[in-house]
Image (spheres, rainbow, N blue to C red):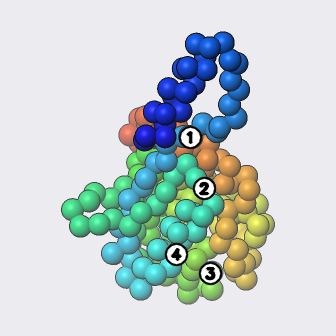
Amino acid sequence: MLRRRLAAVLLALATLAGVQVVTTAPAFAAVRTLYYDSSQAQEFVPVVDQAASLWNTKVTSVRFVKVGAGQSANVRVYADNGWPRTYTSSLGNGYWYMGREAVNDGYYRLRIATHEFGHILGLPDNRTGLCSDLMSGSSAPVSCTNANPSTAEAARVQRNFAGGFAPATDGAEVVYIG
């Protein structure tokens, strides 16, 4: 804080003295923090936490933080015997299921969890069949263990959260299955 004030004063003095100042410092965008609750994900809690951490290493405009005592969650994660699916109410808000059906079929747990978080971050299913595309989901082979978003997918999330806030929505819930 003191450094910023000092820099502002020096810049003002240089401007008054007629010195032309050029700065190349990057503009800092606000980081949107999304709180998630994995307490109802049963045996999948560790992989859900790992998926949240993975997204934190791939994008800088949004960050997942596990909900603490007394905090409200933007994202809730559950486990059931169905197929994985996500219900979003707005960008960065909703809930998803870690479905055991996909796990029992042999799909990679971390890829499933990272994919479902991708829906919360505004990414739709993209059934390319490519293992390199996280959002290709179950169209990629069961043997696919890539849990990382592609460069294009990460860039889209960056754009989605570039202002540090979520755009207004009409409140309609969006459902992603798979």
Q: Residue at x 53, y 33 (%)?
A: 7
What is the secondary structure assignment of the residue under circle 4? helix
Crowding at dot 4, Cα within 10 Å, few <14 / some 14-19 / many 20+, comes out as some
19 horizontally vs 54: left or right: right
Q: What is the three-letter code of the residue carrying label 1? A: Phe
Image coordinates for residue 1, horizontal then vertical, percent = 43, 41
Residue type, numbered disc 2: Val
Q: Around disc 1, counting alpha carbons within 10 Å, would you say few (fewer than 14), some (14 to 19), or many (20 or more)?
A: few
Asked whether, in this view, residue 162 is left or right of residue 136, the answer is: left
Question: Disc 3 vs disc 4: which is toward the camera?
Answer: 4
The residue identified by callout 1 is: 28
Residue picked out by circle 4: 50
Residue name at image x 63 percent, y 86 percent: 106
Q: Earlier in the sequence, mark 1 or mark 2?
A: 1
Please state which amino acid type lies under the numbered disc 4. Answer: Gln
Which residue lies at the image location 70% right of the left edge and 18% below the top edge?
Answer: 20
Instruction: Give residue 59's mark.
Output: 2
Disc with the residue nearer the chain's start (2 vs 3): 2
Alpha carbon separation for disc pair 3 and 4: 13 Å
Between discs 3 and 4, the one toward the N terminus: 4
Whether residues under marks 1 and 2 lie with C-beta atoms below 8 angstroms apart, the answer is no
Distance, label 2 to label 3, CA atoms, is 22 Å
| Res. 173 visible in picture | no
Q: Is residue 56 above or below residue 93?
A: below
